């Protein structure tokens, strides 16, 4: 929700100001939001950005865990569709073909994340990166394999080596 959303008669920004140093967040069960009873979590992200999440199901303490999972899934869908692999452009309709394509794109996504985590990126004024980890990884992979005849195979082999199981465990350690 936005910071100007009214929760039990007060804007969310007022609730956020009530967070004391050291508090992880505020959990409000059964608050009125848009005239409906909802469970609300108000907190700040690691980057200091306000986060207000409301749900009509589940306790307030479980909302953030569900939101984290949902956000990761949204990032995956964005990368598979408009911001990367353009899955929506395929005209495949056979279930087996689509299934194989999704498997291949999943591997490509993981590879892009692993490569992207190794890249440095400038940060915008509001504190977010200029490019997503997936975009950085995809660009690096495309450039590396497009220039393989100029630079040799060493860099390409290093990027292929990132797909080893010991390397993919790095995804879990950074929350992917």
Image (tube, grey):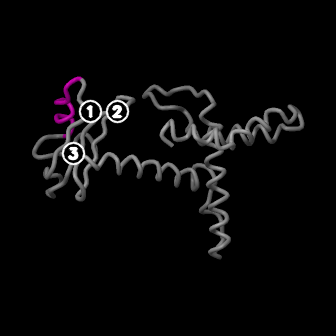
Q: Residue at x 28, y 47 (%)?
A: 53
Using the image as rendered, state which of residue 8 and residue 118 is in the foreground. Answer: 118
Question: Which residue is identified by label 1?
Answer: 24
Furthest residue toward left = 9
Q: Residue at x 14, y 57 (%)?
A: 35
Label 1 to label 2, Cα distance in Å?
A: 13 Å
Using the image as rendered, state which of residue 85 and residue 156 is in the foreground. Answer: 156
N-term-proximal mark, 3 vs 2: 3
* Percent position of residue 93, x then y: 63, 75
Question: Which residue is identified by label 3?
Answer: 5
Furthest residue toward front = 166
Question: Which residue is identified by label 2?
Answer: 49
What count of labels does the image hold? 3
Bounds of the magenta span?
A: 12-21
Label 2 crowd (10 A; few <14 / some 14-19 / many >=20): few
Furthest residue toward bottom = 94
Helix, strand, or loop for circle 1? Answer: loop
Using the image as rendered, state which of residue 35 and residue 105 is in the foreground. Answer: 105
Q: Is residue 166 left or right of residue 130?
A: right
Is 13 a magenta residue? Answer: yes
Q: Residue at x 42, y 28 (%)?
A: 126
In this rendering, the label closer to the viewer, 1 or 2: 1
């Amino acid at each position: 929700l936005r910071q100007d959303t009214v929760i039990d008669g007060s804007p969310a920004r007022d609730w956020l100001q009530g967070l004391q140093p050291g508090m992880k967040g505020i959990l409000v069960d059964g608050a009125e939001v848009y005239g409906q009873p909802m469970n609300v979590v108000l907190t700040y992200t690691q980057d200091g950005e306000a986060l207000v999440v409301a749900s009509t199901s589940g306790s307030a303490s479980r909302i953030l865990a569900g939101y984290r999972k949902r956000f990761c899934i949204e990032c995956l869908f964005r990368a598979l569709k408009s911001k990367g692999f353009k899955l929506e452009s395929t005209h495949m309709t056979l279930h087996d073909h689509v299934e194989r394509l999704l498997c291949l794109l999943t591997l490509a996504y993981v590879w892009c994340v692993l490569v992207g985590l190794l890249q440095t990126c400038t940060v915008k004024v509001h504190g977010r990166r200029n490019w997503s980890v997936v975009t950085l990884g995809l660009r690096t992979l495309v450039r590396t394999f497009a220039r393989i005849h100029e630079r040799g195979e060493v860099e390409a082999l290093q990027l292929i080596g990132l797909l080893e199981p010991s390397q993919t465990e790095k995804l879990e350690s950074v929350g992917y």
